Image (spheres, helix red, strand yellow):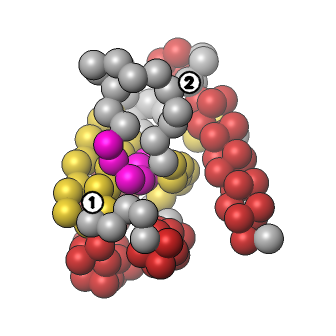
Amino acid sequence: MNNRRKFIQRVTAGIALATLFPFGRKAEAKGLQLKGTLVHHVFFWLKEPKNPEVRRQFEKAIDALLKVETIKLSHVGVPASTEEREVVDHTYTYSVMTFFDSQEGQDIYQVHPIHLKFIEENSHLWNKVVVYDSVDLV
């Protein structure tokens, strides 16, 4: 049942994300104005990616992390089964993409007690983290 719930949540998040991108730079999704939005995309490489207990702990921690009120939209994913190409990286374990209304919202998130607790209680689970932050071009 829990796997079904997670699947439904991920499909819903994927559909929500898919609605953001086909409309170009002026896109809006259910009131989310993308202009000025800061996208914070974090990739995690877990030390024990095949350990189900480690994965459960990480996923539970991510669920708690996404309760930070300045996060307007989020997507949690794992590598897709897309073709192997030189430009595609399938080596990460999880990606977490969060959308903030502004730089200020992301700044609040960075020092938020929930975010700090996430790092403190879970950083032992990963051996590498890469972050890509971006804002709308125009």
Judge whether residue 86 is colored magenta: no
Look at the numbered disc 2 and give the secondary structure of its residue.
loop
Quadrant housing residue 84:
top left
Find the residue positioned furthest to the front.
Answer: 50
Name the mark nearer the viewer: 2 or 1: 2
Q: Amino acid at mark 2?
A: Phe
The one nearer the camera, 29 or 4, is 4
Does residue 53 show up? yes
Is most of the magenta stretch helix, strand or loop? strand
Residue 109 lies, in percent from the top left, at 34, 65
- Between the C-alphas of marks 2 and 1, the distance is 25 Å
The one nearer the camera, 48 or 138, is 48
Region of the chain picked out in magenta, as a range: 91-99
The one nearer the camera, 78 or 74, is 78
The residue pinned by badge 2 equals: 21
Does residue 108 show up? no
Residue at 50% over, 72% down:
52
